[in-house]
Image (cartoon, grey):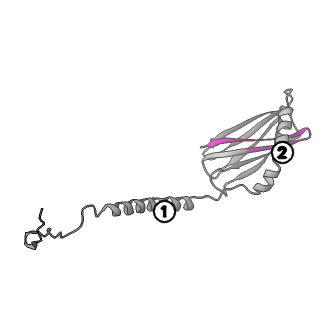
Amino acid sequence: MTLSTDAGNRRNPPRRTGRQPGWYIPWIFVAGFAVVIAVNGVMLHFAFSSWTGVQTEQHFMKGLKYNQDLAGARAQAERGWKVATEFTGTEPQKGILALTLRDKHGNLLKDAEVKAAFIRPTSEGHDVRLDLPYLGEGRFAAPVSLPLAGQWDLRVEIHHATGDYQDEQRIFVK
């Protein structure tokens, strides 16, 4: 076996002009990461620009009073008051809030202090608070005018010589 050292028999490979095959593959990864970063940036923008600032005030103190709140809820359940809440819309964003109070035996409750608060769950600065006067026959009522239509949290607090009562419910105002 002889090896030829003749350089004249060798062929030079053709020179490539241009790019290697697959040159674009690293750029596909770069583009993918750029899309992910852009989408995250858009989501961060919307998250920070749409935050309403609604948060629990004095959350630490409320957490410390949690056991007292549970005891109060048990005492409220033992009293067995029947509170009928009714919101009747009279025109857009206006209505009458009425509560009828009875004890667990069906007797009318009077001489109570009844307070109600309409709280907007999605934004601050629109809350409406009012005191409901006694109208007779265990009924407390007052007209209310709300600044916005939509969902509201109605919080009711009743203070009576025999105990206290509180309740919260979501209502929709047209």
Residue, far right: 161
In the rendered view, tell whether residue 75 sits above or below residue 41.
above
The C terminus lies in quadrant:
top right
Callout 1 amino acid: Gly
Spatial separation of the CA atoms under disc 2 and disc 1: 42 Å
Name the residue tied to disc 1.
Answer: 41
* Residue 78, visible in the rendered structure: yes
Callout 2 amino acid: Asn
Q: Does dot 1 land on a helix, a strand or a loop?
A: helix
Q: How many marks?
A: 2
Q: Give the magenta part as a residue range.
A: 155-174
**Image mark for residue 10:** none
Compared across the picture, whether 140 is left or right of 19 comes to right
What percent of the width, then of the height, locates residue 74?
A: 84, 36
Crowding at mark 2 (Cα within 10 Å: few <14, some 14-19, many 20+): few
Compared across the picture, whether 18 is left or right of 163 comes to left
Name the residue tied to disc 2.
Answer: 67
Compared across the picture, whether 123 is left or right of 30 comes to right
What percent of the width, then of the height, locates residue 25?
A: 32, 60
What percent of the width, then of the height, locates residue 108?
A: 85, 31
Q: Does dot 2 land on a helix, a strand or a loop?
A: helix
Compared across the picture, whether 57 is left or right of 106 comes to left
The N terminus lies in quadrant:
bottom left
* Residue 137, visible in the rendered structure: no
